[in-house]
Image (spheres, rainbow, N blue to C red):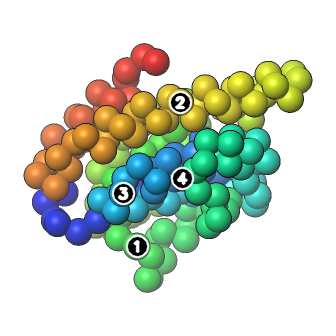
């Protein structure tokens, strides 16, 4: 991305109820205007997982505009131009994605699905906390990048490196 405008990032997951939602909230908060984050799913659940909202609120992160939605919204006329697409689950990374206008740079950051964890409320909340912390660490690395001066090949390599980091 060589433009001085805000870098638009779309976080993708299958259900758009947990991981991608967490990524959207985190990047919008910590991106401080340099980044605008969105999230979507290939098969959206239709509602944000209650524990996603609980963990975000307990960390004083924004939840007001979060909703579970289809990635189709970002292929329509009038959709925001996307610079970066980050898949956060292996299932979404392996799916055939729509054709995105402008050929955004893509990366994959595998995050275990906290919504798949069973157990007590505290055990399930701990899984959401782990996912939030993993995303927060990776987003901090993204924010530190000079995205404005990176070409798409360099940005793709940096996104891959961030996704490979063990946390």
The earlier-in-sequence mark between 1 and 3 is: 3
- Dot 3: what SS? loop
Q: Residues within 10 Å of mark 2 (few under 14, many from 20)?
A: some
Q: Residue at x 81, y 25 (%)?
A: 122
- Dot 2: what SS? helix
Distance between the Cα atoms at labels 4 and 3?
Answer: 12 Å
Q: Which residue is mark 2?
A: 133
Q: Which residue is mark 3?
A: 32
Callout 4 touching callout 3 (CB < 8 Å): no
Q: Residue at x 61, y 26 (%)?
A: 130
For marks 4 and 3, give the one nearer the viewer: 3
For marks 3 and 2, give the one nearer the viewer: 3
Q: Residue at x 54, y 52 (%)?
A: 25
Distance between the Cα atoms at labels 4 and 1?
Answer: 17 Å
Distance between the Cα atoms at labels 1 and 2?
Answer: 27 Å
Q: Which mark is residue 25?
A: 4
Whether residue 106 is visible: yes
Q: Which residue is mark 1?
A: 80
For marks 1 and 2, give the one nearer the viewer: 2
Query: From what the image shows, is residue 57 above or below residue 70?
Result: above
The earlier-in-sequence mark between 4 and 3 is: 4
Residue 149 location, x and y as percent? Answer: 11, 52
Residue 30 location, x and y as percent? Answer: 41, 49
The earlier-in-sequence mark between 3 and 2 is: 3
Q: Residues within 10 Å of mark 1 (few under 14, many from 20)?
A: some
């Amino acid at each position: 991305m060589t433009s001085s405008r805000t870098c638009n990032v779309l976080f993708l997951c299958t259900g758009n109820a947990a991981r991608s939602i967490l990524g959207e909230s985190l990047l919008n908060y910590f991106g401080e205007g340099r980044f605008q984050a969105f999230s979507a799913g290939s098969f959206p659940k239709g509602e944000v997982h209650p524990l996603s909202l609980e963990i975000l609120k307990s960390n004083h992160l924004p939840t007001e505009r979060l909703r579970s939605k289809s990635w189709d919204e970002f292929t329509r006329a009038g959709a925001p131009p996307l610079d970066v697409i980050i898949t956060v689950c292996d299932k979404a990374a392996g799916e055939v994605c729509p054709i995105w206008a402008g050929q955004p740079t893509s990366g994959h950051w595998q995050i275990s699905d906290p919504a798949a964890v069973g157990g007590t409320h505290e055990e399930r909340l701990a899984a959401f906390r782990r996912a939030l912390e993993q995303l927060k660490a990776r987003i901090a690395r993204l924010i530190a990048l000079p995205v404005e001066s990176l070409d798409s090949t360099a940005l793709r390599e940096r996104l891959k490196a961030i996704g490979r980091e063990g946390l």
